[in-house]
Amino acid sequence: MDDSLKQQFEAALALQQQNKLEAAIPLLHSLLIQSPRDGDILHALGMAYAQNHDFEKARSYLEQAIQAAPKVAEFHNNIANVYKGMGQLSLAQRHYQEALRLKTPYPQAHNNLGALLYKLGKYDEAINHFQKAVRMAPFAVDTHYNLANAYIQQDRFLDAKAHYEEVLKLRPEHLGALHNLGITLCVLKQFAQAAPLLEQVISREPHNIDALYHLGVIASALNNGEEAKTYFSKVLELNPNHANSQHNLATVYLQLGEPALALSHFQAAFALEPNNQTAAHMIAALQGKTSPEGAPLPFTRALFDQYAYSYDQHVKNQLNYQVPTLLRQAMAPFINQRQSWDTLDLGCGSGLCAPLFADLATRLTGVDLSPNMLEVAKQRGAYNALYCEDALSFLQTQKASFDLIIAADVFVYFGSLSAVFNACQRALKESGYFCFSIETLEDDNKEDYQLRHTGRYAHRRSYIQQLLAQYHFKQLDEQSATLRTQEGEAVIGHIFVLQKIA
């Protein structure tokens, strides 16, 4: 290329870089007439058409550029981008690989190939290329962002977090990283860090449903009912068919003591997702219908997973929850009869019973359906073993394993208690103890148990008497007590201490 042609070519490139394609393309065509086999001119013309979203012409000129100069890695990388834009992914992959064969290091091609593999759902391979690109170009914002997104697809949230944070160090205003990091922190239960990021997102995108919804989730997890209501309501203004917001708003209204509104939103959630067992359970509860099967496991798990990180504070400060203390007091007269206790905390939740029973337990085992509750319980350091399983399934695997089974506020999620009494009898050692609470249903009620509008079951005392005779327990103690407050009123229950008889 002579000096005159070179100057015109540089002028054309400058126009192209300024996106003045209506001037750049005719100039490049005039240069191509003068030098029809020049790979650089063909490549520039192809790139100009690609900028103009005319992928067919872009492909044609880039193919000619590669024919003129087959060993230029950039030509292969750029035609791969065009093929990707045209949906011809196998051709795109082949040219990215050729670019990487021709040039090393080539972080941009690694990033581009990673993005293609991500699109194909090949996340392991994508991550491999993104990692290589990051090592070669550690300040490449797009690569850190792409790598974080790929980690999310594999539920590697801590790895994703690190790379979203790197994006924001390099480009603090990056909207995608603010959004995705905020949601990632929600998944990691780091709510205090998540909220400011998502608030930045909605300050720039007030109608961002994902951000609004997750701010509602954060408010719910922190037991800020009014704030949660505001966010979920905003989501539903934008999209009335957002099933999760319908469901979560129903839960919020229930906590705020507005059962009619709760029912309306549970019904809307169920209409959108007919397999939503939790919504079905709460509709039955709010309509006064009782099922012997008890609360569905997805309901109990979701309830306590959402509740886990504010549970202790809420039940102690707002509900005046007394059940763990009442169980320990009820067991006090019988403690000296044994030197050591192999103890099962059934439905252990966040572990509120652990400090009260740890001193008499040679081994303290906890079982709960909620992974988040177990995470909180583990931090207490009082349990020898923790199992994430539903209470009945766990008990049915045990035989003569425990000296003491405690169940604090567990049977409120059961209708019929026959199976769990039978399983507890089998799981206890000879003369073992069984100490538990129930919410009390008045004896003049015709049913043995009743599903209340809270989604919890109450049981008759006479029903418990029938069960202990049927499953070979003797009653050592029974006490009426206020278990907690609910909507400002005392919740009356009973504490039982039973002993297995041969």
Image (spheres, rainbow, N blue to C red):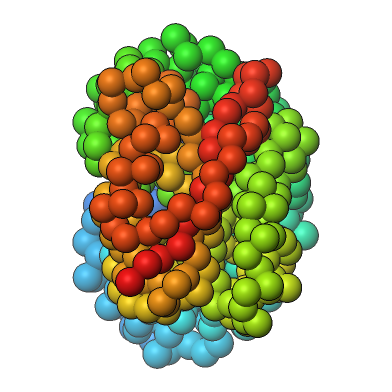
In percent of width and height, residue 452 lies at: 41, 24
Taking 249 as reference, is 389 left or right? left
Which residue is at the front of the view, 235 or 70?
Answer: 235
- 10 in relation to 105, above or below: above
Total residue callouts: 0
Which residue is at the front of the view, 133 or 485?
Answer: 485
In percent of width and height, residue 26 lies at: 42, 45
- Residue at the farthest top position: 260
Image point 22% across, 70% down: which residue? 90
Image point 37% across, 78% down: which residue? 400
Taking 114 as reference, is 206 left or right? right
Quarter residue 430 falls in: bottom left
Instruction: Please indicate, yes or no, whether residue 226 appears anywhere in the rendered image.
Output: yes
Quadrant of the rendering where the C terminus is positioned: bottom left
Image point 55% across, 87% down: which residue? 105
In percent of width and height, residue 433 lies at: 50, 65
In percent of width and height, residue 144 lies at: 60, 66
Which residue is at the front of the view, 416 or 10?
Answer: 416
Image point 57% across, 28% down: which residue? 492
- 4 in relation to 489, above or below: below
Which residue is at the front of the view, 39 or 98?
Answer: 98
Instruction: Please indicate, yes or no, whether residue 207 appears anywhere in the rendered image.
Output: no
Taking 413 as reference, is 23 left or right? right
Quarter residue 271 falls in: top left
Taking 274 as reference, is 205 left or right? right
